[in-house]
Image (cartoon, helix red, strand yellow):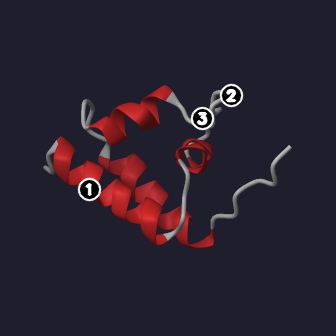
Amino acid sequence: MKSAQDTRAVLIELMAAHQLTRGDVARMLGLTPRAGGSHGTVDMWLSGKNRIPAAKLELIEIKAPTWKSPAPV
């Protein structure tokens, strides 16, 4: 099992490689971003306080290459 820091590093690498925002990651997982464009769950993963579940990380890995950010409102 990967540590919280290992999964955090993978998530950060995925976000950088595919130019994903915190809001993009939230939307990929069916979460609604706050007005600031993020979600508390994603923030906790990126801070390293919580470990991202393997299934969620795998879903992001699958969706990231073809993800299109929604147009700003």
Q: Secondary structure at mark 1?
A: helix
Look at the picture and state if 28 lies above or below 39. below
Residue 65 in percent (x, y) is at 55, 72
Measure how far apart labels 2 and 3 are at the Cα level: 13 Å
Q: How many marks?
A: 3
Amino acid on which disc 1 is placed: Ala
Count residues near mark 2 (Cα–Cα under 10 Å), then give few for <14, some for 14-19, many for 20+. few
The residue lying at 25 percent from left, 30 percent from top is: 49
Q: Is residue 33 left or right of residue 41?
A: right
Q: Which residue is mark 2?
A: 35
**In contact (CB < 8 Å): disc 2 and disc 1:** no
User: Mark 2 and 3 residues: CB-CB less than 8 Å, in contact?
Assistant: no
Secondary structure, mark 2, is loop
**Disc 1 to disc 3, C-alpha distance:** 21 Å
Instruction: First in sequence, mark 1 or 3: give its number.
Output: 1
Residue lying at 49% horizontally and 66% vertically, measured from the top left: 62
Amino acid identity at mark 2: Ala
- The mark found on residue 9 in the picture is 1
Image point (60%, 35%), residue name = 31
Q: Position of residue 24 (x, y in %)?
A: 60, 50
Q: Residue furthest front?
A: 36
Few, some or many residues within 10 Å of mark 3 (<14, 14–19, 20+)? some
Q: Nearer the viewer, mark 2 or mark 3?
A: 2
In this picture, residue 19 sits left or right of residue 57: right
Element at label 3 = loop
The image quarter in which residue 67 lies: bottom right
Say what amino acid the circle numbered 3 marks.
Answer: Leu
Q: Residue at x 45, y 71 (%)?
A: 17
Q: Position of residue 19 (x, y in %)?
A: 54, 65
From the image, state whether disc 1 or disc 3 is nearer to you: 1
Upstream in sequence: badge 2 or badge 1: 1
Residue at the disc numbered 3: 31
